Image (cartoon, rainbow, N blue to C red):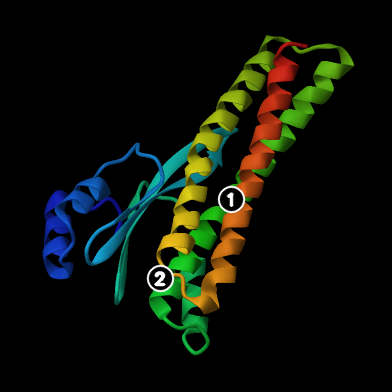
Amino acid sequence: ILSPTSMLLAELGEELDLHELSLEDALTTHQRSKLDEYADHLFISTKVIDIHKGIVVLGELHLFSGSNFIVVIRHRPGLDLARSRERLARAKQSFRPLRSAALYFILDEIVDHYLPVITTLQKDFRNLEGLLLDGGLEQEGLEKLYAIKRGLTSLRDAVDPMHDVVHDLIRLHPEVVCKELRLYFRDVEDHVLRAVNTLDLLRASASDAMQF
């Protein structure tokens, strides 16, 4: 559901018996990735990232996960989860329960989308770093360097809390992360950690370059 109204969410909440606080969170943007547990469902808030003309663009994707449903709320166009839907269609005979497989596919697609954004910022930074070492940067180059540093910080702030979300799913919710899927969720967790480590290294390099 893309950018639902409060009325639509209220109807959804009544139909699926969703907690009112989770419905409020689903309407709210500009919040950190998190996992909240309610009596009959989980609420997961995640950040979706993209890059446009060198600027990191953040969106949000919220999920309600119950015993027999997953509802996805998207704020801003962006990641449409087409790949997750395709994988779920192919996995119906091999993954059980399907609710857990769907959640894995969604989280995996969100996290996999981090890499091209990080790679773009890394490439832009290396280009500026080369110019800096060759003889310095003009004002325009310095402004680009500051923009990259801001983008790396924004991206790190968006990515890092996702580790706690996936880790807590694995550790606290065996009814969701069943034994057969635990390795798959751990792979998502590992990808988040690698993304955070890469961003930390790039941020440190950018800080050093700004004092060159």
Give left or right: position of 17 versus 140. left
Q: Residues within 10 Å of mark 1 (few under 14, many from 20)?
A: many
Q: For the residue marked with disc 1, what is the amino acid?
A: Val
Looking at the image, residue 134 lies above or below residue 90: above
Looking at the image, residue 208 lies above or below residue 195: above
Dividing the picture into quarters, in which one does residue 119 lie? top right
Circle 2 — which element?
loop
Residue displayed at 38% across by 75% down: 99
Residue displayed at 56% across by 29% down: 153
Query: Which sits in the foreground, 66 or 11?
Result: 66
Dividing the picture into quarters, in which one does residue 85 lie? bottom left
Could you tell me if residue 151 is visible in this image? yes
Circle 1 — which element?
helix
Dividing the picture into quarters, in which one does residue 103 lie? bottom left
Looking at the image, residue 27 lies above or below residue 211: below
- Tell me which label, 1 or 2, sits earlier in the chain: 2
